[in-house]
């Protein structure tokens, strides 16, 4: 069983991935994690990724796909041993080109994507969630004014420093990021909708209810 979990920033996708993966025996595959692991191991691909990121550039699809290919090849051995049942893709693929590459990689292993879950949250709710983050400029502690507030409003619990808001957490910046997500994701959803494997859940529901909705949609695919 292989699942792609999709959702805009602030949709709770990462939270759900951390729950759904262990529940279903799926190995989470997130490109950020793969990049960090490759860099730490100083692999040939990792050295290339490190150089690109240090320049402040985006990792090109070709290199991203190559790193995912390596991870899926390793995971095939885990599946053969029965230690994992499949992959839970979190934040990959992001574009139709990456999706096409993933299809080719999985076809080499006589495998495929079974279901794509999109966690939907209204735009303004996402802006409210994301713009509520506050950060301590001294120790780096992160808070949220609604879900994880400091004991004293506007002040870090650890050192008493006034909390600040990052530029990229301002509402206008968040809307730009969400617009970019829409631009990249719409074609990707169309790509998978053609196969009839896209399922949507309400990300505004309580966390446990979102989890149950995802599991219900996955069970329809006869996990």
Image (spheres, helix red, strand yellow):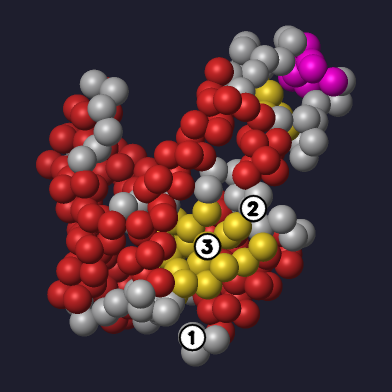
Toward which corner of the image does residue 208 lie, by quadrant?
Answer: bottom right
Span shown in magenta: 153-160
User: In this rendering, would 69 be left or right of 12?
Assistant: left
Task: Pick whichever, 154 or 159, lies toward us.
Answer: 154
Q: Name the N-terminal-most of marks 2 and 1.
A: 2
Look at mark 1 in the image and give the residue it sits on.
Answer: 221
Label 2 belongs to which residue? 121
Q: Estimate how packed mark 1 is, as few (under 14), some (14 to 19) or many (20 or more) residues with alpha carbons within 10 Å.
A: few
Outermost residue toward the right? 152
Q: Position of residue 131 (x, y in %)?
A: 66, 30
Image height check: is 13 above or below 3?
above
Residue 42 in picture, x, y percent from top left? 20, 38
Q: Quadrant of the N terminus?
A: bottom left
Residue 53 position within the rendered picture, expressed as x and y whole percent measured from the top left: 27, 28
Q: Magenta includes 159?
A: yes
- Residue at 64 percent of width and 18 percent of height: 165
- Image-based side of 191 in relation to 100, left or right: right
Q: Quadrant of residue 169?
A: top right
Which type of secondary structure does the marked residue at label 2 adopt?
loop
Q: Which residue is mark 3?
A: 118
Residue at 37%, 69% (x, y): give it.
192
Q: Nearer the viewer, mark 2 or mark 1?
A: 2
* Secondary structure found at label 3: strand
Between the residue at mark 3 and the residue at mark 2, the CA separation in whole angstroms equals: 10 Å
**Magenta span: helix, strand or loop, mainly?**
loop
Q: Residues within 10 Å of mark 2 (few under 14, many from 20)?
A: some
Asked if the residue at tag 2 contacts the one at tag 3, i.e. Cβ–Cβ closer than 8 Å, the answer is: no
């Amino acid at each position: 069983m292989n699942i792609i979990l999709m959702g805009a920033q602030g949709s709770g996708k990462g939270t759900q991935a951390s729950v759904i993966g262990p529940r279903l025996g799926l190995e989470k595959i997130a490109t950020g994690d793969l990049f960090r692991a490759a860099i730490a191991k100083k692999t040939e691909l990792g050295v290339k990724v490190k150089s690109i990121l240090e320049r402040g550039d985006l990792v090109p699809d070709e290199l991203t796909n190559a790193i995912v290919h390596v991870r899926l090849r390793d995971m095939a051995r885990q599946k053969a041993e029965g230690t994992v049942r499949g992959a839970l893709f979190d934040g990959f693929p992001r574009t139709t080109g990456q999706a096409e590459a993933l299809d080719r990689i999985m076809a080499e292993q006589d495998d495929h994507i079974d279901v794509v879950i999109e966690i939907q949250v209204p735009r303004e709710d996402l802006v409210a969630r994301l713009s509520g983050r506050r950060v301590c400029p001294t120790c780096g502690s992160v808070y949220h004014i609604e879900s994880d507030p400091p004991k004293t409003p506007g002040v870090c619990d650890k050192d008493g420093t006034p909390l600040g808001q990052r530029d990229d957490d301002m509402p206008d910046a968040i809307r730009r990021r969400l617009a970019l997500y829409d631009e990249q994701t719409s074609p990707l959803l169309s790509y998978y909708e053609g196969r009839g494997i896209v399922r949507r859940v309400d990300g505004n529901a309580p966390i446990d209810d979102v989890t149950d909705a995802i599991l219900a949609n996955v069970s329809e695919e006869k996990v």
